[in-house]
Amino acid sequence: MEEKVVDIKLAKTAKDDDKQAGSENTNGEDLNSEKEDLSKDKNTSEESLENVTNDGDATEQANNNNDTLGSAAEEITSETNQDDSTSLEANTNVNNSADGEKNENKETEDSTADQENDQQEEESREPVAESKQEQDKNTDGDKGKQESVPATEEDNKNTDEQQEQSNVSTTEAKNEEDKSTDGADGGAFSKGQKSDSSAKDAIELQEVQQESFKESTNFEEPIAETKSSPAQEIVPEPSAGEASTAAATEGDLQKDDQQPDEGSVEPEEAREQDEDKIPSQFYYDSSELQSTAKVAEDSGLPLDLLKIHHSFGYDCLKHHNLLMLDANTIIFIAGNMVQLLDITTNEQKYIRSTSGGGIGAIAVHPSGKYFAVAEKGVMPNINIYEFPSLKLYRILREGTETAYAHIDFNPSGSLLASVGSSPDFMLTVWNWADEVIMLRSKAFSQDVFRVTFSPDNEGQLTTSGIGHIRFWKMAHTFTGLKLQGQLGKFGRTAISDIRGYIELPDGKVLSGTEWGNMLLWDGGLIKVEIARKHKKNCHTGPIEQFVMDEGELITIGADGFIRVWDFESIDTADSHDDSGIFEMEPMNELKVGNGVHLRSMIKSVDPEAQSIWFAQDANGAIWKLDLSFSHTTKDPDQLFSFHSGVITEAVSSGVSQLVATTGDDCTVRVYDYSSKSKLCQTRFNSGGTSLLWIPDIIDPKGRTILAGFEDGVVRVLTVSKRDPNDTTPVKRQSIVTNAQLLLKQAFKPQSSKVTSMAIDSKGEFLSTGGSDSTVFFMTVGDVYKPIGFVDVPGPVTHLTWSPPHFDKNTLLVFCANGEVVEIEAPDSDTYDTSKTFRLKNVKMRNATFKSVKSKLRRKEEEKRKEEEMKKKREEEERQRRIRRERGIESDEEDEEKEEEEEQLPPLYVPDEPNSIHCGFYSTHDPNKFWVSMGSYDAGYLYECDFPDEKKNLQLKREDREDDIGDPCQAVPVTDSNDVPIRNITFSKNGQQVIFGFEDGSIRIQSINQDGLKFKPNTSHGDLTGLGPYWTLNVHDNNYGEVTSVATSMDDRYIFTTGTDGNFFVYRLMTQEQIEEAKAIAKAKIPSARKEDIERKVDDIENKDHYSIEVEKQKAEHDRMMKLAEEKKMNVRRTIARLRRQFKKLLESNADLPEHLQLERMEFEMDPEIKKDMERQTAQRIELVRKELAWESDKHQIALDKLKKRFKNELECERITVISIQSSHEVSTFRTSELSEDFYQLKADMVSRQATRMTERGLSRDPTREALLRQAKRSESESDTMIGIGAQDHKKTMVLTGRLGEKVANALQKAERIKKKREARKAQWVELHEHKPPEDYEDPDDIRAIKEAQEHMGDFKLKTAKDYVVPEHLRMNAHKKLNQLIILKELLHEHKYEFNQKVIGLRNKKVRMITDIKGYIQDLVELQKEMPMEQHKPLPTCPDLHPCEVPEKKFEYTRESLLKFKEEMAVRAVNEIKGIDSGGFGGFGGFGGGAAPPPPEPMKQESATPTKIGTPKQIVSSMSVRSGVSVENISSPGKELSVLEQQLLKVKEIRVLYRQDTILKKIDELIRNFDAELRILRHYKFKEDIDLKNADLRHVTLFEELQLLKEFEKSENVLAAKVESKENEKEEMQIKVAECKAKLDAKRKDIDRLHDKEKALYAQFQASLGENNKFAEFLTKVFKKKIKRAKKKALAEDGASDDESEESSDDDSDWSSEEEDSDEDGLDDSVCPPGCDQALFDNTCALREKRLDFEELLAEEKKTADALKKETDTLNRKQKIIDNALSTAEGDLEAFQLEKQQKLNELDIVVTLKLHQVEHVVNGSLPQDLSSTLVFTNNSMVRLQRRITELKEEKTAQRRLYKEHRQQHVRLIKERKLMETRIVELEEQCKESMIQKFGCVVDLEKIETLGVNRNIEELKERIRQNEVTNTNDLQKWQEKIESKKDRITELTRENTEAIRHLTMLLGENKGLEKALDSRQKTLGGEFQGSRKADLEEKQRLIQLVQLQAQEIEALKEEISLLSRKGGHILPPTQPPMPPTPHNRQVMSSNGPS
């Protein structure tokens, strides 16, 4: 069988190897050819070797490209996986290739080994291998040695990788094609769809892998290749490595089919037709696959060191963690195991996970024969177990990356669906029986809780989770079976996490919500939301599960209720309104119990108990429920009770087999672990945090337990037996048992959680530590009495007392912030605790843990590198020694290529100290202790000591200050992956230590006790000599952190608790059993021979060491290379000899005469040779440039990134300007540019301010605006009326004649009186305008009162509880952000301005240096002409320091680079020699690197002074003026004349003066510069102070901003509420103002109508005249109420009842009046004889007007009443709005006060100098200034001065008040006198009127009754209009008569035509009958004419009707005209003939 499989593998891979090794063979052929050229031409050996090297590099680069392609394929695959609609076959292939890489490489090695044997026969292959190895050696040094194995192995490996990558890319291309074709969410590929060769290669590779899998699992019948039917996806089988690990032994395999003959291979066609499956009777060996403990190598520790004894816990918070296997067996997850529990016998069985990473989900097959266990870990498996045999039946691999969240079988049990957790959330559908993936797709991007198959629709699935539900469908498409997903859309329903749902038979889905209602989904949308009646939720809280049982729908809620609903009602539910909610009530419900949180429910599989269910309670219970809902229904039965959630600690008794636990569920439980039973439990009101079983030294019977709780309470509990006859329940104990927990004492030492408790070794003191950073001490006794407490630096994590052998009794306190405190045991009699329990002056010492993990890791790395380098050098030396012994070593040693030194890991120290989880004293030294750290510092156990000044001083002397505070030693925790250790417990015998890890694992290590003076106990020990480890994963690896580890009293049991709610008891081997197992594990070792010991043999340590044959080939290659080198040396000597000869020839040629000399070109034999060499050189240079291009670009990009990060964002680098004559210096601020975000925030701030100003401008009082608009409207109306009157006045005609003169005189008189009265009225108006109202207040007084209220009186501090935040002082996040922006901008501006000053000073220094250099050059020129004794020393020219020009650091030249290269070379040499180079770093780096080159000196040519001329110019100019040459004067050997001596003297004086002047200028420049620098330096000191204060202010503002952001949301809500109420108030005010304005207008209209009515009465009285005998009759006629035709006849039919009642009242009035009139015997409808007809008509007309006025008045009053009612209603609404606004403003003010109080709690830094502090106590400054008040002296003086000012102001105000009061009394008296005078004058006026007119009259009305020009003009105009109208009326009457005649004539004609038409119609009818009887076909013509006649008839009828209407209209018009006040009625005239205009009028009016 093995040979067959190997043959198959070779056959399948040979073709691929031949295809994909093309590049390798090509390279090999190139190498061959190069080697042959080498052997042929010895002169070109160097070039050949270089070409070979280049080819080798090319081969390596090709391999790198292949690797790049592989990584690209993996990236493409990962991107494809993230799309829901893409098949994941590519990812599977990639994973399979990664898993099977090891096996495939092994197969490739076998095949290549055979090929090598064949290739060794060829002679040409040997030089190739040798040259390849030589290249590797020359190019890569030691790396080449590692790669010097035969190249075929590595190349074949690369070939296999290329093959795998091509398969991946082909599969991905196919996936992309399918995705573009159908766009499905997920799918599978069939083998028939893979038509290309790459897909076939992938299938062949799978066949080979599967056959390898068959071989490793010892199948007798080969398993066929993975099925590729349309319903399945091609998924590779597990790799050979996994299969070998998972292989079952031959004895365990159950063979069902016969094995084919060995050596025979079944044809491929037969395999395709007959698809083999995994045998149904095949099982895995679960004992080989289940995870076991990790044991240190060569330790001999047994794997079964711990055996599970019992589990007392249950992970009740995990979803769906309760299933039924049979009638009595339940299954659930317990940490790293699956637990099977028999509910009748309480027997437990356990199945460990195979991965060791935990278990994610479980599921039971519908048949109950199998159950699935989905695990956690790296690529976890799903294991299918058979029940009840518990054999491992199937393993499903590679379904997710890290963990499974849920799994589920379909109803038939043939398929399994699984969904993974983060990060892939992969949904996979398995054909689990064949271990094949059918479909897969990404379920969602967040956590998925469930996946289930539809029970009625086989191809439908549903998933749900955080904020989503998704509906899946397995659909058949033309590309195969696809998985299509549809995401449920919530629509207007709030998004909810969905935990429970159920698929209904018709395809709809019913799901729950977080708030407890049900959602009915149909087609991906919510059809309806279902709630209970009156909008009550179906459950209080989320619905965890839905169950369909016997046609009833059951919901399980987190509120502990189980409700049964009518399925039909739910299935047909629909909402009847827009709310989308359907209301119904459950049919039945069951409340399981109080405080029950149901997670899931499973039905019993017992056929005799169909109504029994088992429920999972998240509060730690398993319930048995009877859901029969009948009169025989049993109450819920709690089968088991466990801890709910985290179990914080477990402690064991020291005298009995008892163990106690406590947890977050507020219970304390006691168990008997020997009998596997729970004794008792007690529940309290707070969660338990720590436990302590009182030692036997205090309680010999071991019955007392101390329990600490989250609220800081410690309770003393006693365990005791219970009287079996006593059935009374114990307080707080829910279950009656044989034992009881009694409360003995309770006290509260901590204000928050009690984290640790400890009792000293003597049993005298109890110490408790809490998260409130305190440690409390109490005396131990029958009653625990408090001593006091001590504050510690941080929250306490662990407490431990010193061992009994220490001299002092001390307590070691470990804190969460890395602090360790040692407290000496306090004496209760020493401290005074009468006022407080805080203990002072307690002896304490502190130590702070210092993180050294980074240092340790660096040292380990350095040690590893040293060992590698040592092995490397030893191997090189051994190889060199072997070659030397064989005599093949060349004379010239190869130069070793320097390797780039790998960078060591950087040092890292956490910003915040890590927490100390646990610790204890070292047993040998009281100054040392051990700690276990969390977070980053995990991975080591540290032994630390308390600070020692002597030791620290010694370290400082040794220049090791960095080592101060380091731990003494660090013991690495091997193979722990740096997982923190949470607990450390020592066994009772002190031989073992047990660690509890954060990942849920426990570790047992032995302790080497040799040399220990004191043995460890349960709480102390020495971890220096730790032995081999034994590690087992116990709790859940993700959330099952080990909270406590304890041992039993005899070390036979170990107890572990975790945060996953599990509590395990393990049996521990005894030490004798462990030693026995070690002895069995050890093999018998034979004794060594003496000669073997004495013989020294060099071992082969390098795994890449040459084989004997390769070493032989290498030696032969070296020999050939030596010969080649000798040949090259000979060639070089020959070339050198020829060069010498050529040089001699050139010299001889030069000695010849020119005409005989040869040209230089003639010596060149072939110019092309030179060109060819130059071309080769250029190509090599280009090749080097290309090779280094990547490195160059890499470093350039890195440089650009560094510049962008650290340099480009800088606005100003730190520039330090140094003084010249002093040590003073001034530096700029290193500032960066303001970011774009800042400018964006500033722009937003400006826009907000502009918006706020606009809103403030727009936000005016709408009520006032409405009133103003109304007033303006009234004024405009009055102005319009006045304008109209004026216009009419202008249009009045001028009266002429006597009447006009009379009228003019009367008008002038009236005008004079009017002007006089108007002047008097204007005076009154002016007087009233100046008169203030009764409630008038002076604005100055109001302003003064407001100022007094703001600045005087009892002001509340901001810290006061009744402080009201003013509107302008209210602060929000936007305002605070604006302050921050302004402050930041001001800071930047100040720094920028100062930097500009410093830069200006630097630039001035540069200019000064340039000037000084020019001056010094001038001095040098001057001193050349001066004698030496007159020379003054030249001043030193100042230079620019590097810190003054930091930008020069980034400038470099070629010279600087070369210099840096030399320095680096020297430094490398020094490092090799061990010489300290004084730093590290590189060019442009930091710390010891090469200093930047000094700035280049300024060129002297450009430094010539511009203002002062050179001395030479001065002297020459002087010589020109004197006419004597200086050179002539100073020429030697010539006697000078007197004039020349004088000139020389003048020259000397001038030169000396010039020298002094230049020196003074230089000194002045320097002094001025230094002075400016000192001034700027002092200015910077002030700027530093201001900027530092600004920075402190910035910090404060930022803290306030963060605080305000927390309040922003609530404040916005309240502000929006206030704003909405204000808007409502404004709108209401506008409405009220508008209603009032309308009401005022209506009142004015009513008054106007009253005036008109009065005027009408006056006109009627005037028309009667005096002594009219018909006055009474006409008055009755005038006042009579008559019935008048309604103006709106039909439109007002639906009038209101009020109108009908009014009309009835009116009718009654009329009838009474009519009766009265009848009684008088006069008919008021007819003018009586003797009465003037005109007067009667006038009275009737006036009566009509009166009635019109009365109707208008009634309507106006009715409208006014309606407006008044509306105004009252609006006023009431306004009051409601005002109350709501006041409430909202009150809430906002309360919130502002709360926010202000929070702001007051922030600390603000105030910088004070000592002399500013005047607060002293007992002559000294107190240490604590927190209670003091910061106040300035100026303010204090001002306040004292203000006291005097206020007294003076008070006196002045009293004086003014007295004066004003006297003035007020005087003004009141004067007002009374004036009022008396006014009354007297009014009486006189009345008497005068009575005397003159006989009554009191209105003078203005009297004036109007006189001559009125307007009235006279109107009368004249009326008369003229009457004449004109009479003439016009006469003309119209004539027209009407003519029209009437015409109408009569037309009517007559029309009548005649109608009669004639009737006759014709009769004749026509007769003719038609005759014609119809004779010839029916000839009736068409007559029928047409008849149709025309009918149309004509119809037209004439319409014309007659129209004419009749016109007649009636004319009659109505005549009647109206006759009633319009004319004295003579017009005669009756015929109607006017119809005209278009009349027709239009009549058609618009209609008939009357």
Image: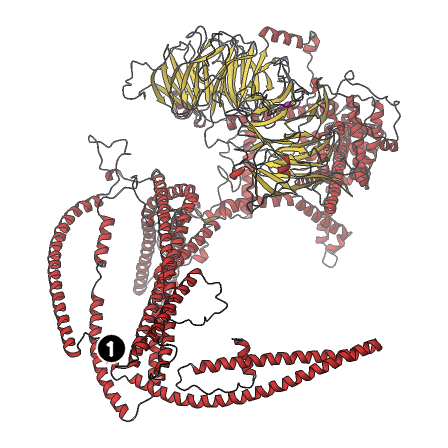
Q: Quadrant of the N terminus?
A: top right
Q: How is the image coloured?
A: secondary structure
Quarter of the image where one finds residue 888: top right
The verdict on residue 299 being magenta is: no
Quarter of the image where one finds residue 362: top right
Nearer to me, 606 or 1890: 1890
Residue 702: x and y in percent read 46, 8
The magenta stretch is 314-323
The verdict on residue 319 being magenta is: yes
Answer above or below: position of 1565 versus 898. below
* Residue that carries the numbered disc 1 in the rendered image: 1901
Residue 130 makes an appearance in the image? yes
Would residue 1312 appear left or right of 752 to someone viewing this image? left
- Which residue is drawn at the image coordinates 66% and 33% (left, top)? 452
Nearer to me, 1225 or 534: 534
**Amino acid type for the residue under numbered disc 1:** Lys
Nearer to me, 673 or 1216: 673
Disc tally is 1
For numbered disc 1, what is the local secondary structure?
A: helix
Label 1 Cα neighbours within 10 Å, binned few <14 / some 14-19 / many ≥20:
few
Residue 478: x and y in percent read 78, 43
Residue 1655 makes an appearance in the image? no
Residue 728: x and y in percent read 46, 12
Would residue 588 appear left or right of 930 to someone viewing this image? right
The main secondary structure of the magenta stretch is loop
Answer above or below: position of 562 versus 1338. above
Residue 1913: x and y in percent read 32, 86
Nearer to me, 1262 or 1203: 1262
Answer above or below: position of 391 versus 1545. above
